Amino acid sequence: MIRTDLGHGRGWLSRPAAESVLRIDEQLGRPADSNSAGRDPQEQQQMVDRMNAGGPFALPVGTSEHESGNAWDSDEWLDPAAAAVLEDNGWRRTALARGEWWHAEYYPYLDNHINDQEDDMNADQAAALKRIDDAVSSGKKGVRNDGTILQLVKGLDAKLEKVVAALPMIERVDAAIRNGKKGVVTDGTVTKLIKEAAADDA
Ligand SMILES: [Zn+2]
């Protein structure tokens, strides 16, 4: 699991869940509220200790979706309009029976916005870009640029070159599959590209 920072001191989630939260930020027009996101086993143990000392319910270490970075506790659920946005983005409250109205888990297949951004940015880069963009559009002076934009563009460029180089082979395979040809031989380029893209993202 790739831990992805949510920005604004909100901790981390798994990459798909974090990207969803960033899309929610965009749709809300502000950073969404977060009380707890991903947790280390040690942090989960602290929650359990707190429960045993009379604190709120906590699942045993190794069984909480907070540890897999797919659970997010937020006060946004108190606002029906914001709650509708969270649901539209694939978040469902799974602990209502325990009275935890704030606890939700991410279901990518229920996310109506999962394909909104078909770019290769990760959540950290997206957050950095948004900070720069916000600063520039608000006319703020002395914006500190950490090189994210340049790095991003260079990364895309390198990826694009690889994809362009592989296009003839991809087209051959695509045509063969479309024409129902059997026994298509591939040299593994497509798989390699996909794996590389995934590795780049890590
Ligand atoms: Zn929770």
Image: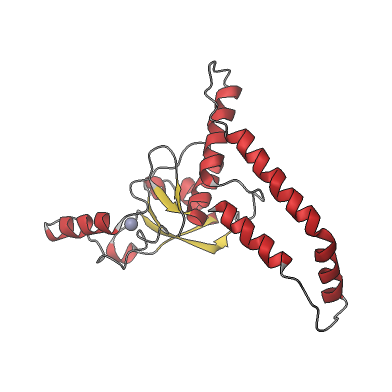
Which residue ends up furthest to the top in the rendered image? 141
Would residue 56 be seen by someone viewing this image from the given angle?
no
Which residue ends up furthest to the left in the rendered image? 53
Ligand 1: quadrant of the figure: bottom left
Residue in the image at 37% along x and 46% along y: 75
| Residue 50 in picture, x, y percent from top left | 16, 55
Residue in the image at 32% along x and 64% along y: 64
Which residue ends up furthest to the bottom in the rendered image? 182
Judge left or right: residue 62 versus residue 109: left
Q: Is residue 115 above or below residue 62?
A: above
Residue in the image at 59% along x and 23% along y: 136
Q: Is residue 201 above or below residue 27?
A: below
Q: Colour scheme used in the picture?
A: secondary structure
Judge left or right: residue 72 versus residue 25: left
**Where is residue 133, by image quadrant?**
top right
Residue in the image at 62% along x and 34% along y: 149
Q: Quadrant of the N terminus?
A: bottom left
Q: Nearer the viewer, residue 4 or 71?
A: 4
Q: Is residue 61 above or below residue 143?
A: below
Q: Nearer the viewer, residue 9 or 100?
A: 9
| Residue 71 in picture, x, y percent from top left | 39, 58
Which residue ends up furthest to the front in the rendered image? 187
Give the number of callouts.
Answer: 0
Would residue 43 be seen by someone viewing this image from the given angle?
yes
Q: Nearer the viewer, residue 31 or 10?
A: 10
| Residue 157 in picture, x, y percent from top left | 71, 43
| Residue 178 in picture, x, y percent from top left | 85, 74
